[in-house]
Image (cartoon, grey):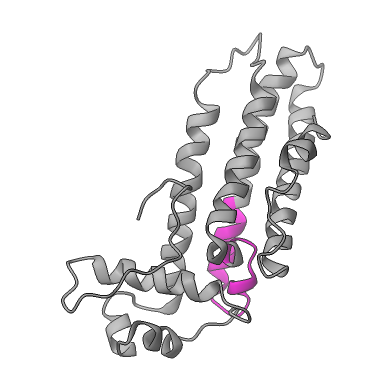
C-alpha cells in the first residue's frame, strides 16, 4: 500500500493462485475498501467479504484475527497516508517563538486540502473516517478515528499559532484553537456530505473559495 494520497486502496487487483507473503492481507483490505464504496455498505459481513474474494471466511481469519482488525488496517492506512504528508507541510519551517510563522495559515489550508483530496480519491475510506462503517463495529475503532481528527486539529493548531504570532496577535493560542476547531469541523462536514451524497458532492468543491472565507 502506498502512503501517498494520490493513490487509492479501492481497487483490488486480480487474485493470484498463490499470493506472495503479505499480498493476501493487502487484497483483503483492498476488497473491504472497495465494498465500502457501494450503496448500503455501512455494514459488511466477513461472509460477504469472503465471497468478494472467492475464499472461505477461515482464509480471512488466517490473516486477521477479527473484522475489527481489518478495519484497523484501513485506519492505519488513513493515518499513515495523511500524517506523513501533513507533517511535511507543517514541519518545513520551524516555529520561532518570538516571530511565529507567516506561512502558518497557508500551511493549515494545505493540510485541510490534503485531507479532503485523500478522501476524494479513497471514497471507501471516507465511510470509515466519518464513522458510518463503524457504527456496529468495536467501539475502539470509532475512538481511534476520533483520535485521528484530534491529531488533525492539533496539527492545524500548530500551524495557526505560528500565523497568529507572526501577525502580532495578543492571544495566539486562543486564536489558533478557534481556527483549528473551525477548520476541522469544516473538513469533517465535507467528508460526511461526500459519503452521504453517495460520493456525488465532492469534498474539494469550491475548496479554495471556501478556505478563503475562513482566513
Compared across the picture, whether 185 is left or right of 19 comes to: right
Compared across the picture, whether 162 is left or right of 122 comes to: right
- Please tell me whether residue 180 is drawn above or below residue 72 in the rendered image: above
Relative image position of residue 2 (x, y in whole percent): 37, 51
Q: Is residue 144 magenta?
A: yes
Q: Residue at x 52, y 37 (%)?
A: 86
Q: How many marks?
A: 0
Q: Residue at x 68, y 56 (%)?
A: 202
Chief SS of the magenta region: helix
Relative image position of residue 121 (x, y in whole percent): 54, 55
Which is nearer the eye, 22 or 38?
38
Q: Residue at x 69, y 26 (%)?
A: 105
Q: Quadrant of residue 152?
A: top right
**Residue farthest toward the top in the current orientation of the protein:** 98
Q: Residue at x 76, y 22 (%)?
A: 172
The magenta region covers: 128-148
Relative image position of residue 153 (x, y in whole percent): 66, 42
- Please tell me whether residue 205 is drawn above or below residue 18 in the rendered image: above
Relative image position of residue 199 (x, y in whole percent): 66, 65
Q: Is residue 63 magenta?
A: no
Q: Quadrant of the C terminus?
A: top right
Q: Quadrant of the N terminus?
A: bottom left
Amino acid at each position: 500500500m502506498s502512503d501517498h494520497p494520490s493513490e487509492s486502496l479501492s481497487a483490488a487487483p486480480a487474485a493470484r493462485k498463490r499470493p506472495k507473503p503479505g499480498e493476501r492481507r493487502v487484497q483483503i483490505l483492498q476488497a473491504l475498501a472497495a465494498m465500502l464504496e457501494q450503496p448500503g455498505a455501512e455494514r459488511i459481513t466477513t461472509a460477504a467479504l469472503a465471497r468478494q474474494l472467492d475464499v472461505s471466511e477461515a482464509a480471512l481469519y488466517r490473516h486477521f484475527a477479527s473484522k475489527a482488525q481489518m478495519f484497523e488496517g484501513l485506519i492505519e492506512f488513513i493515518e499513515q497516508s495523511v500524517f506523513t504528508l501533513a507533517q511535511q507541510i507543517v514541519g518545513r519551517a520551524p516555529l520561532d517563538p518570538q516571530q511565529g510563522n507567516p506561512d502558518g495559515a497557508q500551511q493549515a489550508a494545505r493540510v485541510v486540502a490534503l485531507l479532503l483530496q485523500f478522501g476524494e480519491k479513497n471514497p471507501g475510506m471516507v465511510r470509515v473516517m466519518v464513522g458510518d462503517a463503524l457504527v456496529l463495529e468495536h467501539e475502539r475503532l470509532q475512538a481511534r478515528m476520533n483520535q485521528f481528527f484530534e491529531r488533525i486539529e492539533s496539527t492545524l493548531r500548530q500551524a495557526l499559532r505560528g500565523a497568529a504570532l507572526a501577525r502580532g496577535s495578543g492571544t495566539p493560542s486562543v486564536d489558533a484553537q478557534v481556527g483549528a476547531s473551525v477548520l476541522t469541523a469544516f473538513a469533517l462536514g465535507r467528508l460526511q456530505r461526500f459519503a452521504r451524497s453517495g460520493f456525488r458532492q465532492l469534498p474539494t468543491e469550491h475548496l479554495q473559495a471556501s478556505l478563503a472565507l475562513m482566513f
